[in-house]
Image (cartoon, rainbow, N blue to C red):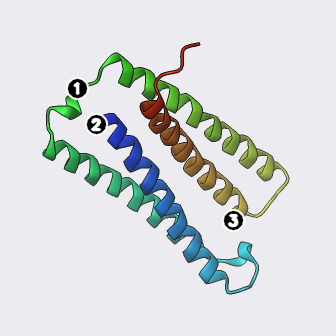
Amino acid sequence: MTHEEKRAWTMLVVSVVAYAVYAAVVLSRAGGGPLAATTYAGALLWTVGGAVAVNIVAEIGMGVVNPRASRVKDVRDREIGRLGDHVGQAFVVIGAVSAMLMALAEWDRFWIANVIYLCFVLSAVVGSLTKVIVYRRGVPQW
């Protein structure tokens, strides 16, 4: 398994776990009441910050274990990285457009923040999943 594939796996797992923790915290705080009335900002910031920190620590750990691998990137790695990033970026655009429309419709800030966060998570998950699949099956020839 290449260093870049390990990075994709790390991003995939950390993103899913962080969002699951966030969802569990927010849903437990709601207690059956309306979600829009739930305090969410602290949980959102902590899970995003925690996910970033865990990814950084994992990258450092992988670099310590195999310092040479983190510097080696061939053409295949660059193609796979580019493909995964392009696939994932679609969800960033979807999130931005959705948030803009929700703001224009004057939806509650809770829903706007959560759709943006969900789309960032989907971007990371789908982009990383694309990279993992392509590493396993090969780069598609168009």
How far is the residue under mark 2 from the one under mark 1? 8 Å
Q: Residue at x 26, y 54 (%)?
A: 57
How far is the residue under mark 2 from the one under mark 3? 37 Å
Give the residue pinned by disc 2: 3
The residue lying furthest to the bottom in this view is 31
Question: On the rendered structure, is 78 left or right of 117?
Answer: left
Marks 2 and 1 in Cβ contact (< 8 Å): yes
Question: Foreground: 137 or 17?
Answer: 137
Q: Which numbered disc, 1 or 3, marks the residue that appears first in the sequence?
A: 1
Question: On the rendered structure, is 117 left or right of 68?
Answer: right
Q: Which mark is residue 110?
A: 3
Quadrant assignment, res 92: top right
Give the residue pinned by disc 1: 72
Question: On the rendered structure, is 45 left or right of 97?
Answer: left
Q: Callout 1, which amino acid?
A: Val
Vertically, is 114 above or below 2? Answer: below
The percent position of residue 42, horizontal first and vertical second, equals 51, 70
